């Protein structure tokens, strides 16, 4: 017996934009290699514009996520197949880049962690599995972002319905504007990438759009959460020689201090880049710099204002 309820939509509808035949790529199999690549590249160039048209909705999702994090909640990504793998990738990269707690952004993939390397295609049809993942991990303080090219993936829709019942904020990002009207979420982010170059191969334009959306979404959230100073990664976790060298470079860029002074400041701050930065910019000792950052919840500009006031 199926675990999906009759009310659930099928994972893919034939009339979904990504399933339609792309007139611009007909007979692509007759082209020489360079022409194939040029045709695919032309299709790829349409994706950023499609993402750009969805930025107002994406901005709302960023604000919802920031509200959740500032209230002690978490951000959850939910996806299947390519969507789930991109979600796992984005969540993992935030930890070293912005030195965020591992549970700030959590990715849930249909089929579990094993599906990252080996497809578990039927997992996306399991509505109850998506709902169960939310019931075991989500609170009313959280924000849940569902990712599905078709806008109809049962695993993702089941997760969003369960998250809404719990009281969490929810958003659905899809490449199917037709799914936005009845999306089981507080917010729909529809990125209309149109027919894929290879019909139905949503790892192509739809997947590229999801990568762009996720990268922009998480970066904007980190900026709003004070994990940067200007456009510098002042919260990064220096876990290898390259990143340790980068911390000194960031300090030099932000303060115009010498390499030796930056290295000394980092040493005095116990390796904490933000503390060293505030110390160098204000002249306050590292203890006062650290205290100002603690009061400002890690916001460098707030700490600078408090010490210069």
Image (cartoon, rainbow, N blue to C red):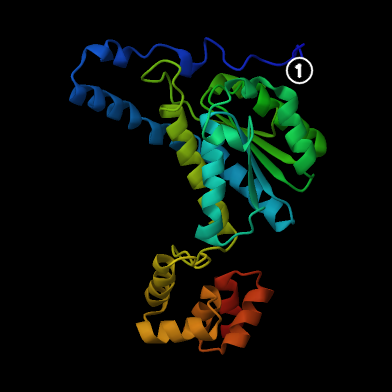
Q: Residues within 10 Å of mark 1 (few under 14, many from 20)?
A: few
* Residue at x 55% of width, y 89% of height: 284
Position of the N terminus, as image quadrant, is top right
Q: Position of residue 271 (x, y in %)?
A: 53, 77
Residue 53 visible in the snapshot = no
Q: Is residue 21 left or right of residue 167?
A: left
Q: Nearer the viewer, residue 25 or 129?
A: 129
Q: Is residue 245 left or right of residue 223?
A: left
Q: Is residue 291 left or right of residue 308?
A: right
Count of labels shown? 1
* Residue at x 41% of width, y 28% of height: 205
The answer to which image quadrant residue 125 occupies is: top right
User: Which residue is under mark 1?
Assistant: 3
* Residue at x 66% of width, y 81% of height: 291
Q: Position of residue 266 (x, y in %)?
A: 49, 81
The answer to which image quadrant residue 38 occupies is: top left
Q: Is residue 54 above or below residue 31?
A: below
Q: Position of residue 102 (x, y in %)?
A: 63, 55
């Amino acid at each position: 017996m199926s675990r999906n309820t009759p009310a659930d939509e099928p994972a893919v509808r034939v009339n979904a934009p990504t399933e339609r035949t792309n007139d611009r790529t007909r007979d692509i199999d007759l082209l020489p290699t360079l022409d194939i690549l040029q045709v695919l590249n032309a299709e790829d160039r349409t994706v950023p514009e499609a993402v750009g048209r969805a930025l107002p909705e994406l901005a709302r999702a960023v604000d919802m996520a920031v509200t959740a994090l500032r209230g002690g909640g978490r951000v959850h990504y939910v996806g299947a197949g390519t969507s789930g793998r991109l979600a796992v990738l984005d969540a993992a990269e935030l930890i070293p880049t912005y030195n965020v707690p591992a549970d700030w952004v959590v990715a849930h993939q249909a089929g579990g962690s094993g599906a990252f390397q080996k497809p578990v295609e039927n997992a996306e049809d399991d509505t109850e599995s998506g709902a169960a993942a939310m019931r075991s991990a989500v609170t009313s303080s959280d924000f849940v972002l569902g990712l599905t090219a078709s806008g109809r993936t049962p695993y993702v829709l089941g997760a969003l319905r369960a998250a809404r019942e719990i009281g969490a904020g929810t958003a659905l990002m899809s490449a199917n504007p037709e799914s936005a009207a009845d999306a089981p979420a507080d917010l729909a982010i529809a990125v209309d990438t149109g027919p894929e170059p290879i019909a139905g191969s949503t790892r192509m334009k739809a997947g590229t759009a999801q990568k762009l959306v996720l990268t922009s979404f998480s970066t904007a959230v980190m900026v709003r959460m004070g994990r940067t100073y200007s456009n510098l990664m002042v919260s990064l976790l220096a876990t290898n020689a390259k990143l340790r060298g980068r911390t000194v470079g960031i300090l030099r860029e932000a303060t115009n201090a010498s390499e030796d002074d930056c290295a000394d400041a980092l040493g005095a701050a116990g390796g904490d880049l933000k503390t060293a930065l505030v110390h160098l910019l204000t002249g306050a000792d590292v203890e006062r710099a650290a205290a100002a950052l603690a009061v400002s919840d890690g916001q460098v500009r707030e700490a600078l204002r408090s010490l210069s006031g």
